[in-house]
Image (cartoon, rainbow, N blue to C red):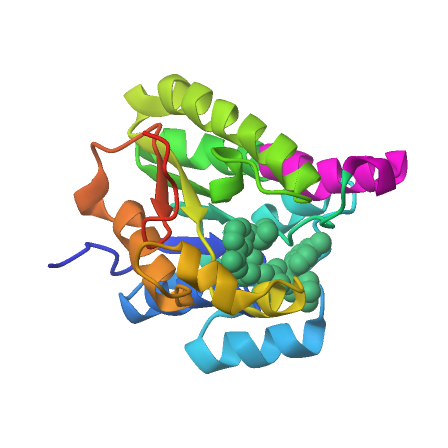
Amino acid sequence: MDFGLRGKRALVMGASKGLGFAIAKELAAEGAQVAVCARNEERLRRAAEAIGATALPCDLQLLGAAEQVVDEAMTALGGLDILLVNTGGPPTLPFERISPDDWRRSFEGLFMSTTDAIRAAIPGMRERRWGRILLVTSIAAKEPIENFTISNALRAGLHGLTKTLSREFAASGITVNALMPGYTMTERLAEAKLDLDKVAKAIPMGRIGQPEEFAALAAFLSSERAGYITGQAVACDGGALWSI
Ligand SMILES: NC(=O)c1ccc[n+]([C@@H]2O[C@H](COP(=O)([O-])OP(=O)(O)OC[C@H]3O[C@@H](n4cnc5c(N)ncnc54)[C@H](OP(=O)(O)O)[C@@H]3O)[C@@H](O)[C@H]2O)c1
């Protein structure tokens, strides 16, 4: 299937490793011009070089950073057709161990960076009457996971935002969807101190997912072919979610 991504211009946020990198790699392989951002400059440059992308170092938890990186991507690529909002995950702690500062920093990094990036990307997409906005959230947005308190709370809000924006921008040819990763083998998952054998056994497919499997979903929803799909939250989770 031709995804129609050749020549499209994409910014993938949080993309020096893990899910973001896999998505950037897939979009580049489909012929898109890609920019990637992350904090660690050296790792980002290595990742960008490996897939022929433009590296834009930034820390999405800093005020104004998301808007700035979208502007930089538009300058580097000559515009932006696809915005893939992906951020670092928040700390995983039970409520009583989360400080007000943890909440504020996580809100800046997870939520404000999303709204700021979208605000910066929208005018050009509206003008060209074509755009794809994808938010990487989590299956925790639908079925809260123990100790993923901040993620459970904020990502459900991002789904509300996704649905709202999808309706606001639909007539301009812009789709807005959320992608829900299930348990997927990245550094973040490895560092989460979970019993991965136990986790895998609880997944109907009996295994942890691979970033490339998630990236395939992102590439499809970024594509020309997915132009009538908007306002959805789609999981790539081996059947882990039970809710309908
Ligand atoms: N993997 C899973 O099983 C899973 C499941 C559900 C949800 N998720 C969510 O999906 C997202 C991606 O997860 P992942 O597993 O790919 O994580 P990861 O392997 O830790 O990768 C995160 C990427 O984002 C960048 N990043 C982190 N904080 C950033 C910041 N403040 N500003 C700019 N870039 C930042 C990291 O680079 P730097 O550190 O250099 O900035 C890295 O490139 C996270 O929000 C995670 O919670 C993951």
Q: Residue at x 36, y 60 (%)?
A: 215
Question: What number of labels is visible?
Answer: 0
Nearer to the camera, 3 or 243: 243
Q: Nearer the viewer, residue 193 or 198?
A: 198
- Residue 62 relative to residue 25: left or right: right
Majority secondary structure of the magenta segment? helix
Quadrant of ligand 1: it is: bottom right
Is residue 76 in view?
A: no
The answer to whether one can see residue 45 in this image is yes
Q: Give coordinates of residue 182: x percent, y percent.
A: 44, 52
* Residue ranking furthest to the left: 1
Q: Is residue 207 above or below residue 72?
A: below
Residue located at (49% from left, 35% from top): 143
Q: Position of residue 23 (x, y in %)?
A: 41, 61
Q: Is residue 64 left or right of residue 84?
A: right
The residue range painted magenta reads 95-115
| Residue visible at 37% across and 30% down in the picture | 127
- The answer to whether 153 is drawn above or below residue 22 in the figure is above
Q: Quadrant of the N terminus?
A: bottom left
Q: Quadrant location of residue 178?
A: top left
Specify whether residue 105 is painted magenta.
Answer: yes
What residue is at 25 percent from the left and 33 percent from the top?
A: 229
Task: Return the residue nearer the eye: 24 or 184.
Answer: 184
